[in-house]
Image (cartoon, rainbow, N blue to C red):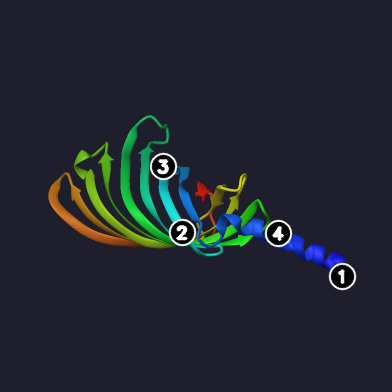
Amino acid sequence: MKNKLVFAALLCIFSFKANAQTEKGKTMLGGYVSFYTYKFEGQYIQKANNFSTSLRSAYFIKDNLAIGLGLLFNNSRSKESDLANLNLLSRQTSKSYGVSPFVRYYFNINEKFKIFNELAINGSIGTSEYKNETSPLFSSENKFKQFGANIKPGLAFFPTKKIAIEFSFPMLSYQKSFYETKYMENPTEFKNNGESFQFGITTFKPTIGVNYHF
């Protein structure tokens, strides 16, 4: 009986420590960065880089359950060249800014590690520019608005009681985009829209974040 009481006491202490960083009333402040690059060789050589970052704050309304808001920034660049990689055929740049309310729930593993799942809704505005090096009149400028949602599972490592280093990967995402395009050969703006849907964890777009819990 005594051993059982000791074991129960230790379990309670361990559970308290595991919940300490994500208990009700705590605040989380931090951010993340995401970067990916790809190269494709077919009829042409295509290269692209994408960088995203977010500053975020959240409040734990219950143990392990937080609601928060993030400020978003995204920058991407791509180019296309011939197979000899000597002549640049086209290049494109894009920048956007936005906000993203989110909800996150943590699951305890032990005192140092927790896994979590996050649902975020996002909205952003931005501009992009496409330059056709061989036919400049087909170059274009774009203004766009984007709205979407995504689900990302992840792992949080607590090297100290207040610092968390996080790794997460996109699992499901949906995005709706609205574009206003103006070509150099024709100043009239053309409006169009598009949708994208992605399902399945991809390790090619990892998100690395650092958060301060207090």
Task: Determine which residue is flagged by label 3.
Answer: 48
Looking at the image, is mark 1 or mark 4 earlier in the sequence?
1
Task: Determine which residue is flagged by label 1.
Answer: 1
* Residue 35 in picture, x, y percent from top left: 46, 44
Q: Nearer the viewer, mark 3 or mark 1?
A: 1
> Residue flagged by tag 3: what amino acid is it?
Ala
Q: Is residue 99 left or right of residue 7?
A: left
Instruction: Tell me if residue 208 can be seen.
Output: no
Image point (67%, 53%), residue name: 111
Q: Residue furthest top?
A: 86
**166, 178: nearer the viewer:** 166
Evaluate if marks 1 and 4 touch, with contact meaning CB atoms under 8 Å apart.
Answer: no
**56, 148: nearer the viewer:** 56
Image point (26%, 40%), residue name: 131
> Residue flagged by tag 1: what amino acid is it?
Met
Snapshot quadrant of residue 82: top left
**9, 88: nearer the viewer:** 9
Snapshot quadrant of residue 190: bottom left
Task: Determine which residue is flagged by label 4.
Answer: 13
Q: Residue furthest bottom?
A: 1
Q: Is residue 156 left or right of residue 12?
A: left
Q: Residues within 10 Å of mark 3 (few under 14, many from 20)?
A: some
Give the numbered dot on residue 193.
none
Instruction: Tell me if residue 11 can be seen.
Output: yes
> Residue flagged by tag 2: what amino acid is it?
Tyr
